[in-house]
Image: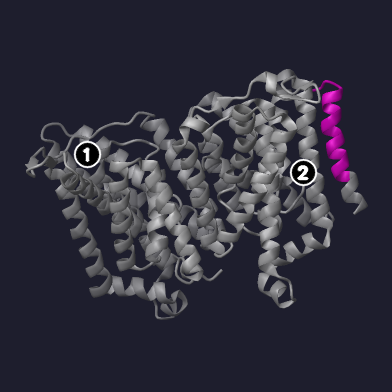
């Protein structure tokens, strides 16, 4: 293949990365924006989504599309409920103290990951693509499913944006993000909002997992890498900012995809992290918005 | 002060006598040698987290900096033990200076995440330069290179005493810092950094010194671990090796000199026990982290200090 088409191929692969990454990063960013906590277990919720997708699709025989659609409905719900439960059981008792919350979410990370190892096992397991059509792009064939992933992510991002800006629920979230005490004074049940947001953040990541599993396989250690990338995205894009997160996700996801195709996945991550160092040097206080600590 | 010296010296004497009188079985002797080196790592971590109040999630970077600096210099350049230890100390001090300079531009939550990310770069770089570092697989330091002053460091007894020596060195440094005016300033920064700033202390410089001391001790522990146990591998740079010292310090008591040792003994045997039962033994780490944050925020020694013995350093 010549360089031009090869670059196009790499960009398309990068776009698939970017689509899923923007969902994961958005979940992380939403939780930080509203609750002012960093959820280190976020990647494990993503992983949980992937292995439950495998489980759901293995239950349904026949057309793989049925299993996929079922997973798309059920998985984000199950993962969301798990997150809501862990918030209810653990995080709210810590009064969302930043340090304690980080330590506790690391604990949750290990528990989910090791639980997956005990039940799902150490092997990577594939999930069949819901439809198997190859589009002929003149120079190379490209899976139609990958386009579907990109499209779904775009639709979901627009939906989230509409919910945040046009609905009463979105207004409540934005009010809580702006000043939780004043919001509470206006009768917003803060602890319930926190509970729902924590579940919602995990559920968004789980949607990303359902979409990626037919391409990537499910594995109990798959949560670490997206977490690192999501941190990078969120630092570059500015936490809590929806537009910034999506823009940075496209930048990082694309370049990660392209560099991975041409060089090595590790060098892509090293470069992306060095970009964070540059951001650090240019605007040290801009990181994570204005954190009060 | 005198009570503290008696307490800490008698702790060291106990560890010495256990070996002298042959109380350890061979199995526990090996375990304790590991625990002592790891506890030295915990001591390094504690200086930053327990005394200065900066939570780093990336100390595996410093540990593996020492580990690889000594390991690679012995493996590729035929350095002897003294040279490689000296190199490891210099390299880890330099890396802590650079990381500290960059990471201290952030505070609070960002500091934790940024340290975590730096440590991930180090881990990925070790994998990337696999032709030098042998990546995940790691490499073995031959027994013939592990000789110091014509003592064979792979001999279990000599290894135990060497580990005890390293730990004593780090622990007594910590005790000395904790009681020095410098250490008092670190605690003041932990308790209220704005007030410390108002009193005229250069908070950032103190924090930077704290990172350098902490990182260098961690690097020394890493180098000793490689030399004493003869194996260098990428798993020591992974996230879990940043979480372990945090957990030891939390369990033993943040800001106490003996806390990391108590925490390391406790977790080492807990994990040892759990790994006999299941492959998923790291779940113990998760449960322990949740337990200390929810129910035992001060840790064992911290609780004792809070309730009974206010003088414990």
Judge whether residue B17 is colored magenta. Answer: yes
SS of the residue at dot 1? helix
In front: B312, or B307? Answer: B312
Query: Disc 2 sits on a residue from what chain?
Result: B
Span colored in magenta: B7-24
> Which circle, 1 or 2, is nearer the viewer?
2
Q: Quadrant of the N terminus of chain A?
A: top left
**Which of the numbered marks, if any, corresponds to residue B188?**
none
Residue drawn at (35%, 40%) of the image: A264
Q: Residues within 10 Å of mark 1 (few under 14, many from 20)?
A: many
Where residue A188 sits in the image (x, y, percent)? 38, 74
B130 w.r.t. A261: above or below = above
Judge whether residue B18 is colored magenta. Answer: yes
Residue occupied by mark 2: B170
Q: Quadrant of the C terminus of chain A?
A: bottom right
Residue occupied by mark 1: A214
SS of the residue at dot 2? helix
Residue drawn at (47%, 77%) of the image: A181
Where residue B66 sits in the image (x, y, percent)? 64, 40
């Amino acid at each position: 293949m010549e360089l031009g088409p090869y670059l196009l191929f790499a960009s398309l692969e990068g776009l698939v990365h970017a689509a899923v990454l923007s969902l994961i990063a958005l979940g992380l960013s939403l939780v930080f924006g509203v609750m002012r906590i960093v959820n280190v277990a976020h990647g494990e919720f993503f992983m949980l989504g992937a292995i439950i997708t495998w489980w759901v699709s293995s239950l349904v025989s026949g057309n793989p599309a049925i299993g996929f659609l079922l997973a798309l409905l059920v998985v984000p719900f199950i993962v969301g409920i798990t997150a809501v439960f862990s918030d209810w059981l653990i995080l709210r008792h810590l009064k969302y103290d930043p340090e304690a919350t980080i330590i506790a979410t690391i604990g949750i990370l290990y528990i989910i990951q090791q639980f997956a190892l005990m039940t799902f096992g150490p092997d990577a397991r594939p999930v069949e693509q819901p439809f198997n059509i190859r589009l002929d792009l003149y120079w190379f064939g490209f899976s139609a499913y990958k386009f579907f992933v990109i499209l779904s992510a775009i639709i979901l991002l627009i939906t989230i944006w509409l919910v945040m800006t046009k609905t009463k629920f979105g207004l409540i979230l934005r009010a809580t993000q702006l000043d939780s005490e004043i919001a509470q004074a206006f009768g917003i049940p803060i602890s319930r909002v926190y509970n729902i947001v924590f579940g919602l953040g995990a559920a968004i990541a789980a949607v990303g997992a359902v979409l990626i599993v037919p391409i990537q396989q499910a594995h109990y250690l798959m949560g670490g890498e997206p977490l690192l990338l999501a941190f990078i995205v969120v630092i570059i894009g500015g936490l809590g900012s929806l537009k910034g997160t999506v823009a940075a996700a496209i930048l990082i996801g694309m370049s990660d995809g392209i560099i991975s195709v041409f060089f090595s996945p590790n060098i892509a991550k090293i470069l992306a992290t060095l970009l964070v160092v540059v951001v650090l040097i240019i605007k040290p206080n801009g990181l994570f918005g204005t954190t009060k600590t | 002060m005198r009570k503290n010296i008696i307490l800490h010296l008698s702790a060291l004497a106990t560890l010495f006598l256990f070996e002298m009188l042959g109380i350890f079985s061979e199995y526990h002797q090996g375990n304790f040698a590991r625990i002592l080196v790891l506890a030295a790592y915990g001591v390094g971590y504690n200086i930053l987290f327990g005394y200065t109040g900066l939570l780093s999630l990336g100390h595996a970077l410093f540990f593996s900096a020492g580990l690889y600096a000594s390991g690679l210099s012995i493996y590729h350049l035929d350095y002897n033990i003294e040279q490689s230890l000296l190199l490891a100390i210099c390299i880890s001090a330099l890396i802590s200076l650079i990381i500290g300079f960059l990471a201290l531009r952030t505070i609070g939550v960002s500091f934790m995440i940024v340290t975590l990310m730096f440590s991930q770069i180090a881990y990925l770089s070790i994998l990337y330069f696999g032709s030098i570092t042998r990546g995940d697989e790691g490499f073995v330091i031959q027994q013939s290179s592990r000789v110091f002053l014509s003592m064979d460091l792979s001999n279990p007894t000599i290894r135990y005493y060497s580990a005890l020596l390293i730990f004593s060195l780090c622990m007594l440094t910590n005790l000395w810092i904790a009681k020095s005016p410098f250490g008092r300033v670190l605690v003041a920064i932990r308790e209220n950094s704005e007030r410390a700033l108002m009193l005229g202390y250069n908070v950032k410089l103190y924090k930077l010194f704290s990172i350098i001391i902490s990182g260098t001790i961690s690097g020394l522990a890493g180098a000793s671990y490689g030399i004493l146990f003869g194996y260098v591998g990428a798993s020591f740079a992974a996230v879990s090796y940043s979480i372990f010292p945090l957990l030891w310090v939390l369990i033993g008591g943040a800001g106490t000199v003996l806390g990391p040792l108590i925490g390391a003994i406790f977790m080492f045997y807990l994990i040892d026990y759990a790994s006999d039962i299941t492959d998923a033994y790291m779940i113990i780490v998760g449960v322990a982290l949740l337990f200390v944050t929810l129910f035992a925020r001060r840790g064992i020694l911290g609780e004792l200090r809070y309730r009974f013995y206010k003088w414990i350093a």
